[in-house]
Amino acid sequence: MRVVLVEPSTVGLECVSRLLVSAGCSVLPFKDSRLALEHLVSDPNIDVLITSFEFPTMSGLRLCSAARQISKEKNRQLYILMMSSDRDQAKLLDALENGADDFISKPPNSQELTARLKSAERMKSAQSDLIRLAKLDPLTELYNRRAFFELGDQICSSASSERPVTAMMFDIDHFKQVNDTYGHDAGDKVIKLVAKAATSLPGISGRLGGEEFASIFFAGEEIAMELAEQVRTEVMEHNIQLESSIEGSGTQLLAVTVSIGVAVSRVASEMNWILKQADTALYRAKLSGRNRVVLVVT
């Protein structure tokens, strides 16, 4: 774990740093709370902030509050531990109200400090799981609609003549018929098959809802069409194996196809616009017989 340690006393700084290194941490020591805050702003890979209360310039509580605000704004996971030689209940409450996760005596006991660091690791792991689950579609583990649009907007706004952006919309052909005939378990298998094919694409891919998927990545027309054909072919060549509902009939194979609309843009734009172009191309693919790729150049 990478730890920013903030302590005004040289002796205290050296003492706690040794304990942290012994616990397997990488330590960045600071005597100045303002410098520590500047580092927290610039370094997104800090796991833990350990700070005392009293400093000549910015107080430990203000540092704690500012660090917590940074972690929220930049969506970072940061565990904050306040240190004090005074076990005053009011100080503890102040620390917690200003964004601290825990409180430890100064100088810290090595076993207690190790326990606090293990708690930080557990909390970070739990937060990572929650963040991951909030962004992913549970069935396919592709990005869900909200996360896909948030990330896709950043890509589309960077489009240029030298670096075109491709939007790809793909839809499972006759999906309602699959669900009606074979049931939702079969439908889920089909969705997973298409999602697996989508993971081969660069950039980001998401499940927008039902049987509709989308991808956004940097590529021109030629590469975009090659990648779309790869997805279409991969889906078509991997039949779904289903257990027959008729006793003694064994298994049966379900053929799956997708229609794909591709739009390429060489100007920075909102993702909604380029996806709409790809959706128009998808509609044309459906009308022209399905199981095919149609390109629109914007």
Image (cartoon, grey):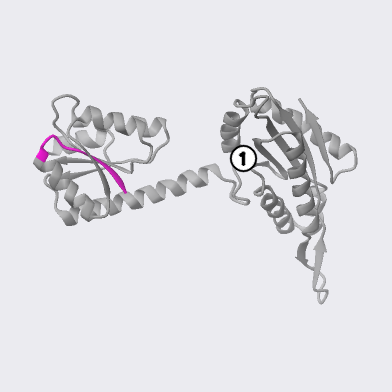
In this view of the protein, which residue sits in the foreground, 258 or 184? 258
Q: Residue 298's image quarter?
A: top right
- Give the labeled residue for mark 1: 203
Residue 102 placed where, x, y %?
24, 44
Which image quadrant is residue 272 in? top right
Image position of 59 (left or right of 262): left
Q: Which quarter of the figure has residue 192?
A: bottom right
- Res 62 seen here: no
Secondary structure category for the residue under label 1 = loop
Q: Position of residue 98 (x, y in %)?
A: 26, 32
Please indicate whether residue 187 sits to the left or right of residue 122 in the image: right
Type of amino acid under label 1? Gly
| 153 is higher (above) or lower (below) than 193 | above
Q: How many marks?
A: 1
Mark 1 Cα-neighbour bin, 10 Å: few <14, some 14–19, many ≥20: some
Residue sitting nearer the eye, 50 or 191: 50
Magenta-tinted stretch? 1-10
Determine whether 161 is above or below 111 in the image.
Answer: above
